[in-house]
Image (cartoon, rainbow, N blue to C red):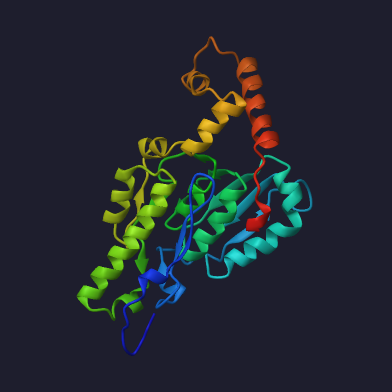
């Protein structure tokens, strides 16, 4: 953002949408800032594109590819509306590949995605910067390889930030860091990863290791507890299967997995329409 004279933003005028395990907190800049001045680093990739795995056919897998730009929230809504019933009736799988982009748009899209209880996977192309917030919105999250999830600190557009005095730059960056930290804590991101994000400059990327991805977890804690209570989810069975326990047969594990999946789809179908 470029202004002839700088005016400190009124941070009390943030638009706040409350987040709890049953909803979401979005901290969006409302007064004193142009929203496009707030970004995570992104590449020169094309704008985000939304497609299904089988155009004109079954709508079981949604692909989200490309840079997140201003307007993509509305683009996403318009794409979903005519396909909503068919998509949510299935397994609600999303494949994400993006180097990031506009943080505000990413947070708005993430609100819809979280309400839909999606299974989110990251392919080899990766999900970095503001895309990380889309990944966090899933209730089942899968990043199969190291260096598939990348993070760094949130930052202001350099043109805007270069016009600030040192004290104003310090104040604004501190406020932004608090906002992002609260958002990440709402998603149960481990504190050490939040610290690592804040220590990584806007010109760098920290790629999560296998241990980091494991620390994030496959499920948000609240959803995992709900699966245990309502669907018979048993993490010990999952761990036995992953460790190659030969006493657990493929048939037994498949029957267990199918039971949990049916329960997730049929009994835990989310109330999502008010967000779309």
Q: Quadrant of residue 78?
A: bottom right
State the quadrant of the N terminus. Answer: bottom left
Q: Is residue 11 left or right of residue 246?
A: left
Q: Please state the horizontal and vertical placement of residue 202, each as a whole percent of the image.
A: 33, 62
Q: Residue at x 67, y 41 (%)?
A: 269
63 or 170: nearer the eye? 170
In the rendered image, residue 177, in percent from the top left (x then y), is placed at: 32, 60
Q: Nearer the viewer, residue 273 or 165?
A: 273
> Left of 250 or right of it: where is 104?
left
Q: Nearer the viewer, residue 225 or 197?
A: 225
Left/right placement of residue 56 relative to residue 247 reads: right
Q: Is residue 12 visible?
A: yes
Q: How many numbered circles does the render carry?
A: 0
Residue at 31 percent of width and 78 percent of height: 8
Can the viewer see residue 67 in this picture?
A: no
In the image, 180 versus 76, the foreground residue is 180
- Furthest residue to the right? 56
Image height check: is 62 above or below 77?
above
- Residue 30: x and y in percent read 45, 72
The vertical placement of 204 against 247, above or below, is: below
At 66% from the left and 25% from the top, the residue drawn is 259
Q: Residue at x 40, y 45 (%)?
A: 147
x and y, in percent, of residue 197 in the image: 32, 52
Outermost residue toward the top?
247
């Amino acid at each position: 953002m470029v202004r002839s004279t700088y005016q400190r933003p009124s941070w009390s005028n943030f638009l706040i949408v409350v987040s709890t395990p049953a909803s979401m907190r979005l901290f969006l800049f409302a007064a004193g800032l142009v929203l496009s001045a707030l970004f995570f680093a992104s590449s020169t990739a094309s704008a985000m594109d939304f497609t299904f795995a089988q155009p004109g056919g079954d709508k079981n897998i949604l692909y989200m590819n490309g840079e997140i730009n201003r307007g993509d929230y509305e683009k996403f809504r318009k794409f979903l509306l005519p396909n909503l019933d068919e998509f949510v009736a299935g397994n609600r799988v999303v494949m994400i590949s993006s180097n990031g982009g506009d943080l505000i748009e990413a947070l708005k899209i993430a609100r819809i995605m979280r309400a839909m209880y999606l299974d989110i996977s990251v392919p080899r192309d990766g999900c970095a910067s503001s895309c990380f917030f889309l990944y966090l919105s899933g209730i089942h999250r899968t990043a199969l390889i190291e260096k598939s999830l990348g993070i760094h600190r949130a930052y202001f557009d350099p043109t805007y930030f270069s016009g600030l005095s040192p004290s104003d730059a310090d104040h604004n960056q501190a406020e932004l860091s608090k906002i992002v930290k609260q958002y990440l804590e709402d998603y149960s991101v481990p504190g050490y990863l939040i610290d690592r994000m804040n220590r990584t400059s806007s010109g760098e990327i920290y790629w999560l290791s296998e241990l980091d991805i494991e620390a994030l977890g496959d499920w948000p804690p609240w959803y995992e507890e709900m699966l245990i209570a309502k669907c018979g989810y048993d993490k010990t069975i999952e761990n036995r299967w992953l460790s190659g326990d030969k006493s657990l047969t493929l048939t037994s594990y498949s029957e267990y997995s199918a039971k949990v999946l049916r329960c997730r789809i049929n009994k835990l179908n989310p109330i999502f329409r008010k967000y779309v």
